[in-house]
Image (cartoon, rainbow, N blue to C red):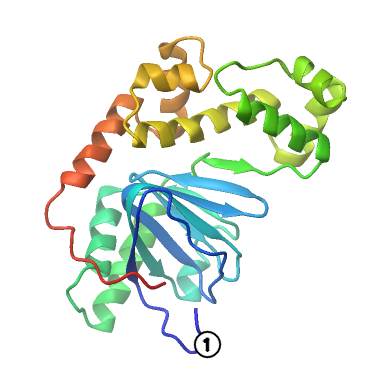
Amino acid sequence: MQPGQALREHVLLLGHDERTPEHKHTRGHLVYPATGVLSLVTSVGSWIAPSNRVVWIPAGFEHRHRAHGRTDMRIVFMAPSLAALLPAHPAVLVMTPLAREATLALTGAERRPAGARSRLRRVIIDDITTAPEQPLHLPEPRDDRLRAVVALVEEGMSNPLTLGRLGHEVGAGERTLSRLFQQETGMSFPQWRTQLRVHHALLLLADGVSVINTATACGWANPSAFIDAFTALVGQTPGQYRRSLREEVARPGDDHHAGRGR
């Protein structure tokens, strides 16, 4: 963003796999994928949001975005007084129906007076802070051994190896790797791998892959285990999530876009 440019809500349309350059803003802002799925990528990890979630990015935080599917990205900047009510770190929050409608109204084509925009922002904040932060964050390990393990897991998603076997491949003991995962990501290895699988599943489902084929591609032994893990993290079954994406694309009245600039 150029110095002196107004921090005003707007819309950014991204094509499938389109990415923004790394950037930061002087004010914290919410980023909502009204359609599609949006990744937020930073040096410390990635967050992912389908259309029933919204991403919070604090002021001054270096980040970039990646779209999965045609993505209608709505951006709402927050005054410091409202930003103080949200986490001090990037986070994924539940996008309630009321907060969604307020976001669409705020970023729509209709020009609203400053007072009305301020009230809509307050509605959004009040509603999205009623639910806890969502566990859709995938931390990025820094240890070289963990990075090597991550690469192997990502390459062999459909054929998962035990941590002991992965350790053998990278020249580190299972106990050491387990301790490092907890230290660097705040998660056990099974928890981290489940997060990775769900992230990957969100993208495959957005591309139209079936639930059964997604479960297989992401390394689950059976569809039931996949459905349970996915629902626990996303708040919808995989089938409900796929249907919601189709409904968002077909939803009338949202195609009033304000341009492509940040």
Q: Quadrant of the C terminus?
A: bottom left
Pinpoint residue 230: horizontal percent, then vertical percent: 44, 26
In this rendering, does residue 237 appear at all?
no
Across and down, in percent, residue 200 comes to: 49, 33
What's the residue type where badge 1 is placed? Pro
Q: Left or right? Give the position of 76 relative to 179.
A: left
Q: Which residue is mark 1?
A: 3
Name the foreground residue: 237 vs 97.
237
Q: Is residue 230 above or below residue 109?
A: above
Residue 111, quarter of picture: bottom left
Residue 57 horizontal/vertical position (percent): 52, 61
The quarter of the displayed image where residue 183 is located? top right
124 and 218: which one is in front?
A: 218
Which residue in the rendered view is the most extreme toward the left?
Answer: 252
Q: Residue 11 vs residue 146: left or right?
A: left
Residue 84's spot in the image, x, y percent?
53, 67
Label 1 neighbour load within 10 Å: few <14, some 14-19, many 20+ = few
- The residue located at (37%, 48%) in the rendering is 16
| Residue at the (38%, 67%) spot, across then down | 76
* Residue drawn at the location 60% of the way across and 57% of the way down: 89
